[in-house]
Amino acid sequence: MVTELQSGKQWYVLHTYSGYENKVKQNLEMRITSMGMEEFIFRVVVPEEEHVETTKTGKKKTVNTKIFPGYVLVEMIMSDEAWFVVRNTPGVTGFLGSHGQGSKPTPLLDEEVHNILRDLGMKTKKRDISFETGEVVKITGGAFNGLEGKVEEIDDEHERLKVSVEMFGRETMADVEYDQVDKY
C-alpha cells in the first residue's frame, strides 16, 4: 500500500566530484539508515553501462563506465530534513536544478526517469496493485493502448500480465506491464 507520504516521491540529480559517484552512493545509503530517513529517501542510483574493451596486450575485459560522470540520481520526497541529509553527504556538491542559497531543486520529469531506468534495466516504480485471473482490465499503454481484455496470467515478480484482447475478430494475448493497465 502506498502511503500518503510516499506519493510525493520524485527523482533528483546530485552533482558530485567526478570519480566519487559510487562513494557518494555508499555514503548516502549509510546516512539514510543511520539518520532514519527510509521514509523520505528511497533509491540512490549511479547510472553505468557495461562494455568490452581490448587491452594493450589484446585481452578483452568488461568495464563499467558512468553514463553521467559526476552525477548521482536519488529518489526522494523533498522535505527540509531529506534535503539537508542529502545535501550534506560527503562528496555531494549540490543538486542539479537548484539555484543556491538553500533553494529546493527541480525534480526530473517522469519521462526522463523512465527512459534512464529502463535503459539500465530497472523499474521506474513499483505499483501497489493486485490483479486476479479473469478480471477485466483496460490497457492504457503500449501497442494495445485503449483495448480492454481479460487477465489470463499474472507474473507478480516481474509485474507483468497476459491479457486476452479481441483484435480483428480474434482473441489475442497481450503481454503488458502493471503500469500499462488500469482496473475497471
Image (cartoon, rainbow, N blue to C red):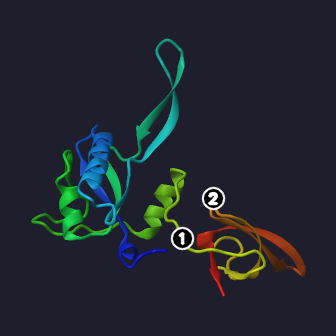
Q: Quadrant of residue 95?
A: bottom left
- Residue placed at 52% from the left, 54% from the top? 122
In what element is the residue under mark 1?
A: loop
Residue 141 screen position, x and y as percent = 63, 74
In what element is the residue under mark 2?
A: loop
Identify residue type, mark 2. Glu
Q: Callout 1 environment at 10 Å: few (<14), some (14 to 19), or many (20+)?
A: few
For residue 182, above or below residue 114 = below
Marks counted in the figure total 2
Q: Callout 2 environment at 10 Å: few (<14), some (14 to 19), or many (20+)?
A: few
Q: Which of marks 1 and 2 precedes in the sequence?
A: 1
- Residue placed at 26% from the left, 45% from the top? 27
| 180 with respect to 38 (left or right) | right
Residue 20 screen position, x and y as percent = 27, 39
Q: Nearer the viewer, residue 124 or 17?
A: 124
**Residue furthest bottom in the image:** 184
Residue 44 screen position, x and y as percent = 36, 53
- Residue placed at 54% from the left, 70% from the top? 127
Q: Nearer the viewer, residue 17 or 7?
A: 7
Residue 52 screen position, x and y as percent = 53, 29
Q: Quadrant of residue 104?
A: bottom left
Residue 157 has which mark?
2
**Residue furthest top in the image:** 57
Identify residue type, mark 1. Arg
Q: CA distance from mark 2 to mark 1?
A: 12 Å
Which quarter of the rendering shows the C terminus? bottom right
Instruction: Identify the residue under disc 1.
Output: 127
- Residue placed at 49% from the left, 11% from the top? 57
Q: Quadrant of residue 150?
A: bottom right
